[in-house]
Amino acid sequence: MTSTPDTPVTAAVIPYLAVTGARRAIDFYADAFGARLRGEPIEMPDGRVGHAEIEIGGAVIMLADEYPEIGHVAPSASGSPVSLHLSVIDVDATVDSAVAAGATTLREPADQPYGRSATIRDPFGHRWLIQSPAPEPAPSGAVPRHGDLVYVSLWVPDVERARAFYGFVLGWRFDPAGRQVEGLSLHHGLWTHERSTLFVCVGVDDLNAAVGRVRHEGGTAEEPHVEPYGLVSGCVDDQGMPFALYQLDTDGGPRPSANGAVHGDLAYVSVETIDSGRFRTFFATVAGWRFTPGRVADGWGVDDVVPMTGIRGGHARPTVVPMYRVDDIAAAVERVRAAGGTSTEPAQQPYGVTVECTDDQGARFQLGRL
């Protein structure tokens, strides 16, 4: 092209799929890829779906039943001229979910120079390239970065009961004082508190400056003070969520894995907040967090923070819910129930198999085989 077109172009190109059986397709994409329906489908007088929109990981896809009379036709038996690329955390788990929902595997998951990938054909003839990018090698001696979670503490009414419960369920071992979990990739403690939540400590490059930003954004922050493990400040955000800030240093140990490395590790952090917009503004200013739309309504992922963290608005009060990594999800569920807790049945997600649990004191947590 030698000139710029006069017609303005928006920032996104949205696939519009023709399918035979649009309502079945919507259900398939929900089961296979965790798709969320955006609004109600438009139904035409003859019963066909004239327009529907789904969202997969923040990306919008439009679809409708085929209308041969206007040239809107589904793929033929010989294939589709267009493929859809889906980037996921766990290629194998996503392919398993899609096949269980009715897809056909065209190319089994395999490691490539550009990442792990596979190809499937959905029941409606569309070809999907499923890929997770190759992890970037961590630089030698990598340490936690500004914005990472460097310490967490599970707040529970009775620490002794929590030690017994999580020791049995996750195999946690504790230091002589019974307050710190030993052998995990991230420092994890237990603390007595009347309400149950996960308390998080965020690492920052300049603690004094970060404390000033907390106060400027309407939160509260203690004066920085020295603890045996470093310089910290206890804070509360502008919606009432307690957290802490920690001054990072070059001797902070290796950066933990995004989703934990061993059985019992913290694998994901879900922050339930009142107003997601206010939360994003606050922590973008205080900790440099950047956000990407998530897979659920008013859900957001925090970019390049470890362990992986997401938020969701619309809750009555702030609560942080941890997900712990397990090697055998079925056995872990049995242990939760045997210890007096509750658990949902395992559910396949694009990134693994998860369950929603409560411990024997009513604290919510999740388990994941990721």
Image (tube, grey):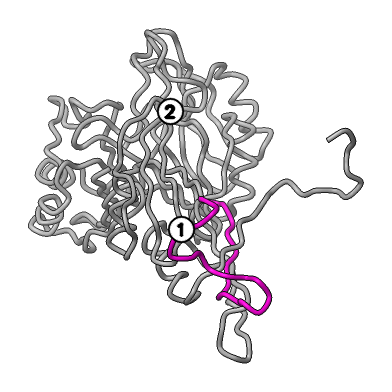
How far apart marks 1 and 2 lie (CA) works out to 25 Å
Question: Which amino acid is tagged 2?
Answer: Tyr
**Residue positioned most to the front:** 78
Which residues fall within the magenta stretch?
58-83
Residue 185 lies in magenta, yes or no?
Answer: no
Residue 233 x %, y %: 49, 26
Q: Is residue 69 toward the left or the right of residue 324 in the image?
A: right
Quadrant housing residue 109: top left
Q: Secondary structure at mark 2?
A: loop
Q: Which label is found at residue 79?
A: 1
As rendered, which of 351 and 232 lies closer to the eye? 351
Q: Which mark is residue 99?
A: none
| Residue occupying image coordinates x 50% and y 55% | 56
Q: Which residue is mark 2?
A: 114
Residue 116: x, y in percent?
36, 35
**Quadrant of the drawing holding the N terminus:** top right
Camera-near label (1 vs 2) is 1
Residue in the picture at 51% in, 27% down: 147
Q: 32 or 173, which is in the foreground?
A: 32
- Residue type at the position of mark 1: Gly
**Vertical side of 368 occupied by 80: above or below:** below
- 196 versus 217 height, above or below: below
**Residue 362 locus on image (x, y percent):** 26, 58
List x then y, in percent, for residue 324.
Answer: 26, 42
Say which quarter of the image contains residue 69: bottom right
Which of the two discs, 1 and 2, labels the residue nearer the N terminus? 1
